[in-house]
Image (tube, grey):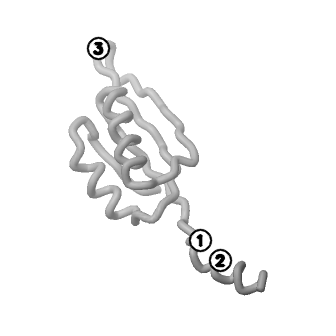
Amino acid sequence: MAESWFFILGKRIQHHPEFSVELAYLEKTYLDNVLRLCKNHHMSIVNLRIHTVEEAEDEVHYTATVDLRGSMTPEALLQLIRQMPGVTSAIVL
């Protein structure tokens, strides 16, 4: 009895591979919008690394690397992220 229950439970649990997305964005609020988009599409944020790159005194660019896991494919997620305002680039690592 217990073996069949674990078999059924195992079939319901799906393994979703982890992947990393590197983002470049203009302001910190745009990263919040990307993270909200990921959560709304049931993506788990495994790790988040934020980097600040200053090119000139008055110009600041931000980059972040986000490790994600979920049922959405990296290509589908990138398509949504690239359409968001304030995101200058997004690639899968």
The answer to whether the residue labelled 2 contacts the one labelled 1, judged by CB atoms less than 8 Å apart, is yes
**Mark 1: few, some, or many residues within 10 Å (few <14, many ≥20)?**
few
Total count of labels: 3
Q: Position of residue 47 (x, y in %)?
A: 57, 44
Q: Position of residue 27 (x, y in %)?
A: 31, 27
Residue with the mark numbered 1: 13
Classify 7 as above or below 78: below
What amino acid is labelled 2 in the image?
Gly
Marks 2 and 1 sit apart, C-alpha to C-alpha, by 5 Å
Q: Secondary structure at mark 1?
A: loop
48 and 90: which one is in front? Answer: 48
Q: Is 60 left or right of 66, judged from the image as shown?
A: left
Q: Quadrant of residue 87?
A: top left
Residue with the mark numbered 2: 10
Q: Secondary structure at mark 3?
A: loop
**Mark 2: few, some, or many residues within 10 Å (few <14, many ≥20)?**
few
Residue with the mark numbered 3: 58
Marks 2 and 3 sit apart, C-alpha to C-alpha, by 54 Å
Q: Secondary structure at mark 2?
A: helix
Classify 34 as above or below 69: above
Q: Which residue appears at 34% of the width and 49% of the height?
A: 90
